[in-house]
Image (spheres, grey):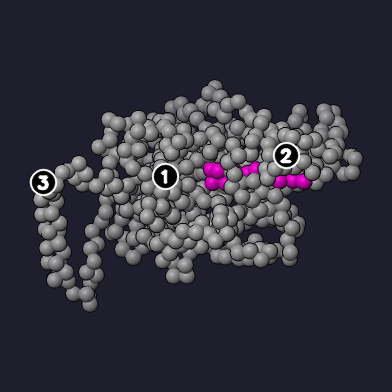
Amino acid sequence: MATESLQRAYRAPCPGCGAPVEFRSAQSTHAVCAYCQSTVVRSGETLARIGKMAELFDDHSPLQLMASGSWNSKAFTLVGRLQYKYGEGTWTEWHAVLVDGSSAYLSEDNGSYVFSTLLAMQRDLPDAAHFRVGGTTAINGKSFSVASNQQVALLSAQGELPHLPVMGQSFAMVELRSQGNGSIGRDESVLSIDYGTQPPSVSIGKPVLLDDLKLSGLRDQSAKDETGRQFSCPNCGAQVAVRLASSKSITCGSCNSIIDLSQGIGAELRHALQDEPVAPLIPLGSQGLLQDVPWQVVGFQHRMGFDPTDPDEHFGWEEYLLYNAKRGFTFLVDSTEGWSVVKPTTGAPVMSDNGQSATYLGSRYQLKESYNAETTYVAGEFYWQVSRGQKTSNRDFASGKNLLSMEQSPKEVTWSAGSNIESDAVARAFKLEDKKELLKRSDAGPGSAAKGVGFGTVIVLFLIILLFLLLISRCSSCDPKTENCASSSARSSGGSFGGFSSGGGHK
């Protein structure tokens, strides 16, 4: 362990190969032999072999078995790993054993990490179908928002485990998120209900940074093995190299096909063709120091927003997926209104009854825009199964420079929070000073270097007056009884800061 030794441990030979299998927690009932991959179950002091586990889809996480750390001043060790599959990809949960022998989990959560412990229920839980995505419910007297209701299946496992669902057999997994009452402070939490057991097992967790867990025994490097992570594009045959083995989709650099990696390299790869490639201003693979954190650009997508009441009203924006081995993923969003850095939240903000405002961590945000969104182009790698044509219902909120966004699909709701960032900071971060003019957005403001009222200012004032006269002329010929007198001209780009993929998915 990190600072203390376990009170007890049990070791017995594997029924399949005779290698030692160790149980460090009295709550653990299953283990996967590290030598022959046999799945064994413990009954008292006896081990029985019940099958063989599939090979792990190596995600090249810095985490590994026997890494140890400290959480809430309690030492723990990672002793098991579970990999699950759902509609949009896979995610990993690490089984942690605390110094007292109790179980906890360190799991992926929309590109970040959550540390969870088991929660005893005060009453029986309803069936999974009772939890409606986007609705609210109370668990043990605390209010939660239903963020996800998915059918999942165990893909593979490793090490020591408190329970083991039947591999490949689907069951429901419901995810709830705390309402994040700002008066309590940073009270963000995520509650997971696992219907793979009877009664369902419940765990509750809070967001963590790997650095804060004071981990030791991590992998020295989370980069891929180049020779093991290359394959031929199933559409054109060109070589495709995967930089992050945790990626669930990637695009071919030759034919722009989107390739499904959710089954791992070697499985049958699905692909979808893309026309009209879009060139990102920040090249994929670029590295930069943004907000004092080193990031690498690993993914890019272009998205369009549509007014649900007027299909002709549309706008576009672009998102860069950034990766850091210790921080996970975040998004750099580019719209004509400016650049912003945003990240999925662990807690669920509280939205007002009329939907015109939302409160998050004590701050009140006003609704800026409601629209439907669609992904129109993707490039690079993503930690969820992204695809062209993915659609969500979005709401963007703002409080000064702070931003809040909600995306909803039939199976999940994803909230994200962030803030505006100056275009000059983006240029400096990724060493793109030669593209400063291309990166400039409305945040730069006109005539920022002007002294007094010069010729440029006169032109701006003239244009404003001309626009005002045009609006008066238009409205004077508009009959509000028969048509909408507001402008319905299409916006070619910009207008949204929230752009997240719903692809964060359950995890």
Query: Which residue carries the number 2 mark?
Result: 75
Q: Position of residue 254 (x, y in %)?
A: 39, 30
Residue for badge 3: 454
Task: Tell whether label 2 touches label 3 (CB within 8 Å).
Answer: no
Name the amino acid, label 3. Answer: Gly
Instruction: Return the residue at label 1.
Output: 341
Q: CA distance from mark 1 to mark 2?
A: 34 Å
Which contiguous range is marked in magenta? Answer: 102-112
Bin the neighbour count of mark 2 within 10 Å (Cα to Cα): few under 14, some 14-19, many 20 and up.
Answer: many
User: Percent x, y for residue 272?
Assistant: 44, 41
Question: Quick one: label 1, few (<14), some, or many (20+) residues within 10 Å?
Answer: many
In the picture, the quarter occupied by the N terminus is top right
Secondary structure beneath dot 3 equals loop
| For marks 3 and 2 on the same chain, the one whose residue lies earlier in the sequence | 2
Q: Secondary structure at mark 2?
A: strand
Q: CA distance from mark 3 to mark 1?
A: 35 Å
